[in-house]
Amino acid sequence: MPILTLIQAVNDGLKVAMREDERVLVFGEDVGPKGGVFLATEGLTTEFGKQRCFDTPLSEDGIVGAAIGMAANGLRPVCEIQFQDFIFPAFDQIVSEAAKLRYRSGGQYTAPMVIRTPYGGGIRGGLYHSQSGEAYFTHTPGLKVVIPSTPHDAKGLLLASIADPDPVIFMEPKALYRHAKGEVPAGHYTVPLSTLRTVREGEHVTVFCYGSMVPVVEKAAAQAAEQGIECHIVDLRTLLPLDEQGVLEAARKTGRVVIVHEAPRFCGYGAEISAMIAENVIEYMEAPVRRVTGFDTPFPNTLEHHYLPDERRVLDAIEEVARF
Amino acid sequence: MPILTLIQAVNDGLKVAMREDERVLVFGEDVGPKGGVFLATEGLTTEFGKQRCFDTPLSEDGIVGAAIGMAANGLRPVCEIQFQDFIFPAFDQIVSEAAKLRYRSGGQYTAPMVIRTPYGGGIRGGLYHSQSGEAYFTHTPGLKVVIPSTPHDAKGLLLASIADPDPVIFMEPKALYRHAKGEVPAGHYTVPLSTLRTVREGEHVTVFCYGSMVPVVEKAAAQAAEQGIECHIVDLRTLLPLDEQGVLEAARKTGRVVIVHEAPRFCGYGAEISAMIAENVIEYMEAPVRRVTGFDTPFPNTLEHHYLPDERRVLDAIEEVARF
Amino acid sequence: MQSTQTSEPFRVIQSDGSVGKYKVTLSDAELIQCYRTMLTVRAFDDVCMKLQRSGRIGFSVPNKGIEACQVGAASALRNTDFFFPSYRDFGMALYHGVEPVEMMHNMFGNAKDAARGRQMPVHFSFVDPIKFFSISSPIGTHLPQAVGAARAYQLRGEDHVCLTSFGDGGTSSLGFHSALNFAGVWKAPVIFLCQNNGWAISCPSSEQTASDGFAIKGVAYGVPGVVVDGNDVLAMHQAVREAADRARAGEGPTLIEAVTYRMGGHSTSDDPTKYVPKEELAKWQERDPVVRFQAYLKKRGLWTAALETEWTQAAMERVTAAAKTAEATEGPGLETIFSDVYAELPAHLRAQGEAAFDLARRKGSADAGDGAFPL
Amino acid sequence: MQSTQTSEPFRVIQSDGSVGKYKVTLSDAELIQCYRTMLTVRAFDDVCMKLQRSGRIGFSVPNKGIEACQVGAASALRNTDFFFPSYRDFGMALYHGVEPVEMMHNMFGNAKDAARGRQMPVHFSFVDPIKFFSISSPIGTHLPQAVGAARAYQLRGEDHVCLTSFGDGGTSSLGFHSALNFAGVWKAPVIFLCQNNGWAISCPSSEQTASDGFAIKGVAYGVPGVVVDGNDVLAMHQAVREAADRARAGEGPTLIEAVTYRMGGHSTSDDPTKYVPKEELAKWQERDPVVRFQAYLKKRGLWTAALETEWTQAAMERVTAAAKTAEATEGPGLETIFSDVYAELPAHLRAQGEAAFDLARRKGSADAGDGAFPL
Ligand SMILES: Cc1ncc(C[n+]2csc(CCOP(=O)(O)OP(=O)(O)O)c2C)c(N)n1
Ligand SMILES: Cc1ncc(C[n+]2csc(CCOP(=O)(O)OP(=O)(O)O)c2C)c(N)n1
Ligand SMILES: [Mg+2]
Ligand SMILES: [Mg+2]
């Protein structure tokens, strides 16, 4: 099987989808001849022509709004928002429109579409090229929110998202674009949405994470193992709709939980995981449920390595919870 | 002391602020001659003239964007978004700009401004005149988020918000606009931000709530008391920055916690309260931390009374937690 | 063909009902269909106003004054075209054969409403007999959606067009800007119909923008703009037909400004006497679009006082019967809160639905029934 | 005074350096200040490119080709006016006396940077000696902010103006639409400067919109539009001065389209050879704004080859020294992550800051020091 980086896997996934289904089209800012600022769409215009992969004017509202109309009229748009930080001009189209169209029309009109967008820190992008806005979307019923952490999952989840009958926000961990490498099957395959991935089995501490934090947690877990603490790592992959039973089982298994994400803590996605546990399996908990997250500040530039949860911080939480 | 409704208290608060400080100005859609669709701004154009209370074109992006520029240039804008459901076109200005201006300029530029907006259900407003979007804002560092539940607090918190050096999202529970009545001191007074209000003392179950849910919780608590369950009710009032110590103390006091809000549960504000408890005082918890919230669906119209947490649902959770 | 507010809007029917040299292409049957649809819109308004005032429905939106815009525009399109309407456009659906009872199901928010009572009244959605896109409350969001749908036609080489309708206030929205810009660049087969009815709730058109009318805004996007007398069915028909012809021929979008007037309040919640100058209203009352069209039909020999009575009564009866049927239809089941969020019900919504039914069983509930969660 | 792309942009300096009948009002000192600022912008670009290529800074944005826009515009305003710039405008700040070292502190993101290294490079913020509003990455958000600030001047009866600058791509943003509309309605004292430099990253101006250039977009808002040769310092000066005069006289906003060209990549991360046609670049290289201004200065007797060498070297030395100083300045302290989120540090941020310091103490950290949380 070929070894691809995460960004190559995304590119491959787009090509497979476009070859298989002529309703699929790709558009956004700079996705055409330039191939996207991260090269996710490289070669698409050449292979599929300007009708199926093209640049748009600089308007995220227009990109998402048009995608909704295309989706409602028989196409399968996969649009790109250049950085997740720039998705907010399209926020109304996403939360008021794409998310609610099926509900408000009783299924007469629907929006099967994918919004791909790179998220997260680690590239010295400062306030506006680093954010992790997943919680804005996971609080919005009607949306699906998917975040891969490996090349294999990136392609498989992307193909599942494109095939999905509902709108999917597909957030790509840009810090892993070139750093995550792995085997990726050629051609079509899917990783079903709303399934968890057990990254590592262990009986002492359960760690929930996703996207860019997965390799950080893996490294911390390796260090914890040296001290005899075995971590059970769960990559959530689909944040909404979440496999809640799977999460609760994994939490119950060890009774000790750490949740890791880049986004600010306050009302971040980790709060939901923790609340779910406190609501359903609190009696199995043998330690406080710890969150290791970005700070409740905007995203800084020079000091981003302090802002982002790293092995040190994750390990510290694992140790604390294990020893409680 | 005069008895005012919540909407009258807001109106009074605006007048007091405008009389005291000529930098204060009010604008938005239909806030001028019409006095706002809920009459929050009635009489302001007459008293203060068209320069200080005026209508704008139909653009929330323009309203909030202009407010930021005014605030950065020495004014104290208090703008209105007609329904919280229509704040999303301004989302970029709020989360990318108002929230981050102080941080990104090291305090050289700031945005002392208030965005007033009615939120919540109970007026048969369906999907788009009923939403409770507080969690979108409380996940955004740099913003303050305030929600009053009584006429007294509405005026006092509004005056504190207008005086505050940072941007405040001031969400008004429209279901209580005319239903909440109470004594409101004349003239200037403030209720400090980031302070909790203990609505009722009790030793069995702690209930956290805010805005429109406060009277619902009070009624449920009265019924619980008939069964011998005494509730300790906390009105959070300022959701961000929250008095976290106060929350943890109130949770610890009874060891049994119910959290109530209208917004959808998944990644809602209640998740943060629960996570905070699970992280800091889990060892004092004697029962699961229960959330009573809107469902994880868009807001329905005909069946809104089922969607909104009511006394039945709140009481059920109180009983369950008390008997655990 | 660019024109501005200061120039005269395109008009066909003069106040005496004459049409000068204009060659009317609509058949007698179509003309009568236009007129009777306008009467049905009025009947619908009247009935809804009464239903609202008597507390039987929560809300409605009057159309008085703008019936010609809706009906004239609809008459120029095919029933295979795609409508992206605002909340003040349902005359378009009526013209193409949507039954008033379908609308009344929405007004009452009952189980037969397409949206199962989830939307506020006046937020219709139809797929049959025409594609009338689900109406949203946020202003302007449907404009880029119409452009996207139009682009789909373009890509598939189909000759359908999209028509999207919005108010003077809507031109300030974000969607207007993105939609016109994208449509211009893509040469998408879409018609932008701006119904300048003088007001956006209490904000007069003159304070909505400093531009010289609204049609001229097309210049900013390379989209031709035309100003039409919105109280003139035939002028509306002509303008929309030309725009549709252009669109089908691959010549791209058109922005039509229909100059008209909202003769009632913004909605049943609004009191326009607080802000609408009396003289202004009086002036527009003289330009009533129904009266004007009547004059033309009379000249053409299609209208008599007797027919008027017959048609008015028929419209009233049709709408009243529709309201009766809708009012008698049962409300949506509790399970409709949870369905249609996604194509498939996810586990967390199943759990929430089951809990809701369980609570209703245990604690009773006015209208939830006591069955099990059926989804 | 409306003009479109198809008409010729307003120009003063011909390619041979002559200005025909145009009466230059800038003094010799001001003209030299303009020219030397342009050279400083180039020096800054060169130094930053080298710093970026050698990995000492992360990012920078080239200005080659658009120096005249920035400097000509700035020279027409007072240092009491308010600038709302984009990331390709810092020549305006340089012209008004902001020191290169202040900028370099930002490029290195160090402790002396106004934003304490929180922003990416090129995202400046200055309050002194001019108000140069904190630059944001999201495109177009600063436009309505400039309008709000202008309205504040208007309300207080002050005669300052706001200038906001943005690209051709920026005209498609939401902020452009709201800002021009509000400014038109309010007659706000604001100047909209659209620097049409041919590209928005890889999207050519011709695909950004179907309108006939960008100045014409003002028509949609009742805002006068003018097209100016953006590679001509004096034309830029004249257009902005007229707009400022109008604004100060209460006559409202102006939209200026400066037709210019981005001769480099979008940023140091971009490879323009992938999408910029070679011939197009070559054509614009012949219209280099520095060369054109030089020709004028030479004619006027203000420029010699010796002066050029002196000025270029001085600029280079000034910028190089600034970079040295900035590079030698220590990085921001860990506590700067937590400060300036609010005017006062809230309890939860204090707790997070203390935990960060505590962890650094316990587990060590490259650059956090081992002190206590100082806030
Ligand atoms: C984004 C948004 N902001 C505000 C509102 C509240 N609102 C509803 S209708 C309306 C006025 C619309 O005026 P116009 O576009 O002229 O349409 P008309 O009602 O006159 O047909 C406003 C402000 C809304 N629905 N959506
Ligand atoms: C809202 C938003 N969307 C996308 C981007 C990414 N982006 C940064 S610069 C740019 C192009 C801007 O082009 P233009 O406005 O012409 O300015 P120029 O760079 O040519 O000076 C884009 C798309 C952004 N910064 N903000
Ligand atoms: Mg209107
Ligand atoms: Mg450009």
Image (spheres, coloured by chain):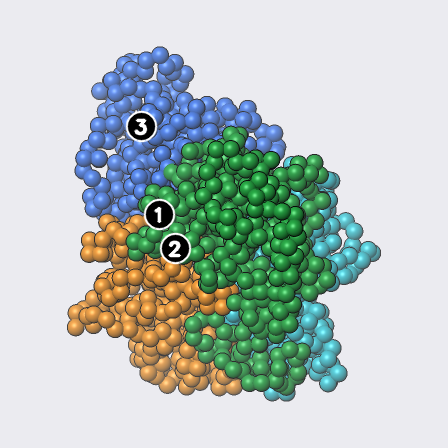
Chain colours: A cyan, B orange, C blue, D green
Residue shown at the point (26%, 47%) measured from the top left: C270
Amino acid type at mark 2? Ala
Decide if residue C38 is on the left or right side of residue C153: left
Check disc 2 and report the residue beneath it: D149
Check disc 3 and report the residue beneath it: C231
Image quarter where the N terminus of chain C lies is top left
Indicate whether D198 appears above or below D102.
above
Residue A52 visible to the viewer: no
SS at badge 1: helix
Q: Going by the picture, which residue comes out furthest to the right?
A: A1
SS at badge 2: helix
Query: Looking at the picture, how far across and down is residue B114, in whole percent?
Result: 36, 62
Query: Looking at the picture, how far across and down is residue A317, in whole percent?
Result: 62, 80
Local crowd size for mark 2, using a 10 Å CA cut-off: few (<14), some (14–19), many (≥20): many
Marks 1/2: CA distance? 14 Å
The residue mark sitting in front, 3 or 1, is 1
User: Which residue is nearer to you in this view: B16 or D19?
Assistant: D19
Amino acid type at mark 3? Asn
The chain holding disc 1 is D
| Quadrant in the rendering for residue B154 | bottom left
Check disc 1 and report the residue beneath it: D248
User: Which residue is nearer to you in this view: C342 or B140?
Assistant: B140
Decide if residue A46 is on the left or right side of residue D362: right
Indicate whether D46 appears above or below D249.
below
Instruction: Confirm whether circles 1 and 2 share one chain.
Output: yes
Residue shown at the point (60%, 55%) measured from the top left: D40
Query: Looking at the picture, how far across and down is residue C94, in whole percent?
Result: 38, 32
SS at badge 3: loop
Amino acid type at mark 1? Arg
